[in-house]
Image (spheres, rainbow, N blue to C red):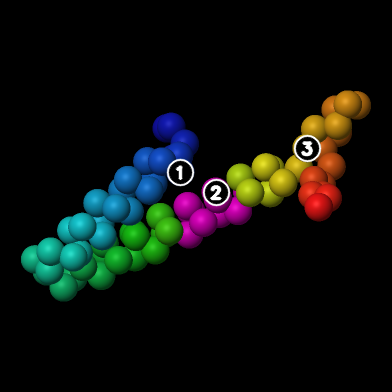
């Protein structure tokens, strides 16, 4: 099974939001879709957090990662 990506999760989340905004979803389905949306949101937040941490590090000449510190 292919690993879920940030982009596909975000698209699914957007679809659920549009569906719920229409207001035509039965209550039981709405609760199920809401739970799914919250799982997707948590997944996307975690992916963004990890990406931010990676971007905030730079690769040094000897191949190790170190924290990037911006000097003003």
Residue at the image position 24 percent from the left and 51 percent from the top: 15
Compared to 18, does 55 lie above or below? above
The magenta-colored residue range is 42-50
Q: Position of residue 19 (x, y in %)?
A: 18, 58
Pair 2/3: label in front: 3
- The residue most toward the bottom is 27
| Circles 1 and 3 in contact, beta carbons < 8 Å | no
Q: Position of residue 12 (x, y in %)?
A: 31, 48
Q: Which residue is mark 1?
A: 6
Residue at the image position 88 percent from the left and 26 percent from the top: 61
Inspect the magenta stretch and tell me whether residue 10 lies in it: no
Gap between marks 1 and 2, in whole Å? 7 Å
Compared to 34, does 53 lie above or below? above
Q: Which residue is mark 3?
A: 58
Horizontal side of residue 43 vs 62, given as left or right: left
N-terminal label among 1 and 3:
1
Q: Which residue is mark 2?
A: 47
Callout 3 secondary element: strand
């Amino acid at each position: 099974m292919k690993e879920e990506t940030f982009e596909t999760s975000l698209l699914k989340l957007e679809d659920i939001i549009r569906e719920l905004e229409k207001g035509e979803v039965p209550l039981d389905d709405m609760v199920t879709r809401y739970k799914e949306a919250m799982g997707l949101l948590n997944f996307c937040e975690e992916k963004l957090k990890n990406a931010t941490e990676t971007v905030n590090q730079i690769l040094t000449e000897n191949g190790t990662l170190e924290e990037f510190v911006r000097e003003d």
